[in-house]
Image (cartoon, rainbow, N blue to C red):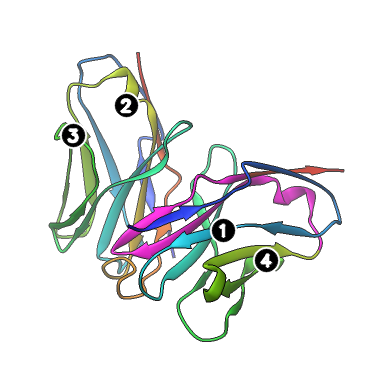
């Protein structure tokens, strides 16, 4: 079956703009989580959504937000972009809430965001 | 607090040589442990996972990892490395959310 699909794969934005990234989970997966990956900070957890509700949130400012739709697809939005937001944004899906129940997360290929 | 440490930032091995990547974690309860691999420009691919039971787990691509509770370690091993194994390797502990190590970059010399 198809894996986690993220769109767009690459995008360039100007400082101050906003961006929306999309993620389609593996069919049947109800949990979607988002991560930011940068060379300096590594992989950092942004948030997790399950059944259209945000279940867990990382330590990021309110400019970073997300949502999940009834078909489990998810979007994340970053407003008022800063140069430091340039990163690879990874989406991951799992059957249920992440690992407290032993679920494995499967990653998409990511969306490369460059802020200029 | 939960954390994962990968002490080796970069490792270089010759093709055909054995490999061991180190991972130490900090977590108060029995952890869920994972190893992922990331090729340049790609997402993360699951290599193997440990939830419970046998402490030696087998994964894809000939990788295995051993959970040692007394050492809080979950080291990844491969008996014979192939050039295609060159990538970034991440250890992770699952505890409400995933906590990733900073990664180990593997270079394979022909």
B104 or B109: nearer the viewer: B104
Residue at 30% from the left image edge and 71% from the top image edge: A100
* Helix, strand or loop under label 4: loop
Task: State which chain disc 3 sits on.
Answer: A
Q: Which residue is mark 1?
A: B23
* Helix, strand or loop under label 3: loop
Q: Nearer the viewer, mark 1 or mark 3?
A: 1
Membership of B90 in magenta stretch: yes
Residue A67 placement (x, y as % from top left): 15, 48
Task: State which chain disc 4 sits on.
Answer: B
Lateral position of residue A100 relative to residue A72, left or right: right
Query: Magenta stretch?
Result: B80-104
In this rendering, the answer to whether B13 lies above or below B22 is above
Whole-angstrom CA distance, mark 2 to mark 1, is 28 Å
Whole-angstrom CA distance, mark 4 to mark 2, is 34 Å
Which numbered circle lies on residue A85?
2
Q: Which of marks 1 and 4 precedes in the sequence?
A: 1
Residue B108 placement (x, y as % from top left): 78, 44
Lateral position of residue B110 relative to residue A11, left or right: right
A94 or B66: nearer the viewer: B66
Residue A114 placement (x, y as % from top left): 38, 22
């Amino acid at each position: 079956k198809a894996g986690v699909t993220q769109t767009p794969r690459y995008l360039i934005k100007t400082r101050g703009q906003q961006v929306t990234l999309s993620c389609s989970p593996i069919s049947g997966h109800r949990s979607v989580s988002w991560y930011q990956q940068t060379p300096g900070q590594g992989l950092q957890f942004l948030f997790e959504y399950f059944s259209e509700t945000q279940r867990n949130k990382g330590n990021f400012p309110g400019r970073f937000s997300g949502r999940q739709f009834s078909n489990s697809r998810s979007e994340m939005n970053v407003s008022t972009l800063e140069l430091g937001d340039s990163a690879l944004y990874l989406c991951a899906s799992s059957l249920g809430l992440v690992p407290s129940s032993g679920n494995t997360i499967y990653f998409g290929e990511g969306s490369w965001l460059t802020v200029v | 607090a939960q954390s994962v440490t990968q002490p080796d930032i970069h490792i270089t091995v010759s093709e055909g040589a054995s490999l061991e990547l180190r991972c130490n974690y900090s977590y108060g309860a029995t952890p869920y442990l994972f190893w992922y691999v990331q090729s340049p420009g790609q997402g993360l691919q699951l290599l193997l996972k440990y939830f419970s039971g046998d402490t030696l787990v087998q994964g894809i691509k000939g990788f295995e990892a051993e959970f040692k509770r007394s050492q809080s370690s979950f080291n990844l091993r491969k008996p014979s490395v192939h050039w295609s194994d060159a990538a970034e390797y991440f250890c992770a502990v699952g505890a409400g959310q995933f906590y990733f190590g900073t990664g180990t970059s593997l270079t394979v010399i022909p």
